[in-house]
Amino acid sequence: MYHLIFVVKIKNNMRVCILGNGLASLTLAKSIVNQKIYVDFLYSKKTYPVNKTRTIGISKSNIEFFNEKIINIEKIIHKLKKIEIYSDNLEKQKLISFGNNSDHLFSIVKNHKLQQILEKNLFNNRYFTKTNYKKTINYSRDYDLVITTDYNHPITKKYFNKKIEKKYNSVAYTTIIKHDKIANNIAAQIFTKNGPLAFLPISEYETSVVYSINNYLKGEIEITKLIKYYNLKYNLKKIDKIHSFELKGLSLRSYFHKNILAFGDLLHRIHPLAGQGFNMTIRDIKFLNNIIQNKIDLGLPIDSKLNIEFENNQKHKNYIFSSGIDLIHQFFNLERKTKNEFLSKSIQYFNKNSSINKIFTKIADEGLLF
Ligand SMILES: Cc1cc2nc3c(=O)[nH]c(=O)nc-3n(C[C@H](O)[C@H](O)[C@H](O)COP(=O)(O)OP(=O)(O)OC[C@H]3O[C@@H](n4cnc5c(N)ncnc54)[C@H](O)[C@@H]3O)c2cc1C
């Protein structure tokens, strides 16, 4: 005897509210409207100047997810085949390298270009509405789910103020250098005595620079001089305006309150030395996307239960991952302070072990492997 099972798809009137206007909120909004769920995108009137020197490195598996489930960004990314790590302590010798010359490992994209492509697409989407914050909204009553990425919104201040904070005592300086044409697909990170300095290629003619410098050196140094000093391979033509950011790390103690979920850098902010902050958010979106799809398939509502599932699965992974990045930061700080070559020499030793190298490459690409 056969049992016929009918799965009835209920009409989808679900409505999600997203607070904030950064890369995390736009990417998340696009992934949700792709699932044919209405999104009200609420932002404050306050605008911030566009910083055209900011770039983001996105791992290979996250680019694949982005292209398939969010929006195709192939046209605006620059693909890298290798990442090489150097140390001042060993007189700019190579410590370790990830990737080989044949495969694509990481991609670099300009923040404002990613923001533009997402906004342009969302504004033409019938599931998407963008409005200013209104005082009259009752977030628990008017929406199935509210997701906040905005540090300054009253809801964030009320429900998400308990966090573990980490002071790096560092400032990140970012700029773009223009140079002669070069086959530019190898990124370099140098652990200098002032802090980590990354050269991240964005085209054959341009490379983004992120230099995280320890606070006590602020003002005493000229960043352009240091960039020139550490520049290993580019024939420089111009160094763009230099922007700076105070670096802080944080992990929220609780990811949600009832049907309100925190997201993006508001949930977890880490040191940029490994280029993983936004990659963590993409992994969060991947998981959220899966739970939403499962609920839709089963005809279940999207509500606070989804937040419980999200926190149970992602919180410990994100915490361990962030702690791993902090450990790398402390590790090189210690080496810098003690001027001891032992740590760098041990990394060079690990570099010769291809299975350890493969594990690190996989974690940087896909996150924790459990
Ligand atoms: C120097 C640097 C390099 C980085 N490199 C990488 C990388 O290579 N790979 C990677 O994965 N991650 C990287 N990151 C992390 C990545 O930039 C963040 O994870 C990501 O931009 C966070 O997006 P968000 O929308 O959550 O936060 P935000 O962009 O901070 O936005 C959150 C909220 O703040 C508001 N906001 C926007 N601009 C401002 C402003 N200027 N002042 C105050 N509020 C504002 C927005 O409206 C929004 O509501 C880097 C970070 C830094 C600082």
Image (cartoon, rainbow, N blue to C red):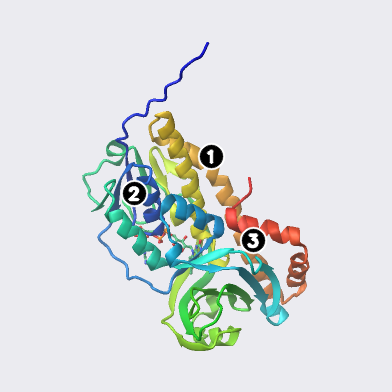
Residue 39: x percent and y percent? 31, 46
Residue 341: x percent and y percent? 75, 75
Q: Earlier in the sequence, mark 1 or mark 2?
A: 2
**Dot 2, crowdedness within 10 Å: few (<14), some or many (≥20)?**
many
Secondary structure of the residue carrying tag 2 is strand
Residue that appears at 32% across and 59% down: 119
Q: Which mark is residue 327?
A: 3
Residue that appears at 59% across and 84% down: 233
Q: Earlier in the sequence, mark 3 or mark 2?
A: 2
Residue at label 2? Answer: 18
Q: In the rendered structure, which amino acid carries the disc numbered 2?
A: Ile
**Along the line of sight, the residue nearer the viewer: 17 or 75:** 75
Q: In the rendered structure, which amino acid carries the disc numbered 3?
A: Leu
**Along the line of sight, the residue nearer the viewer: 329 or 17:** 17
Residue 283: x percent and y percent? 51, 51
Q: In the rendered structure, which amino acid carries the disc numbered 1?
A: Asn
Q: Is residue 234 left or right of residue 351?
A: left
In this rendering, the answer to whether 274 lies above or below 368 is below
Q: Which mark is residue 312?
A: 1
Residue 255: x percent and y percent? 46, 45
Q: Earlier in the sequence, mark 1 or mark 3?
A: 1
Quadrant assignment for ligand 1: bottom left
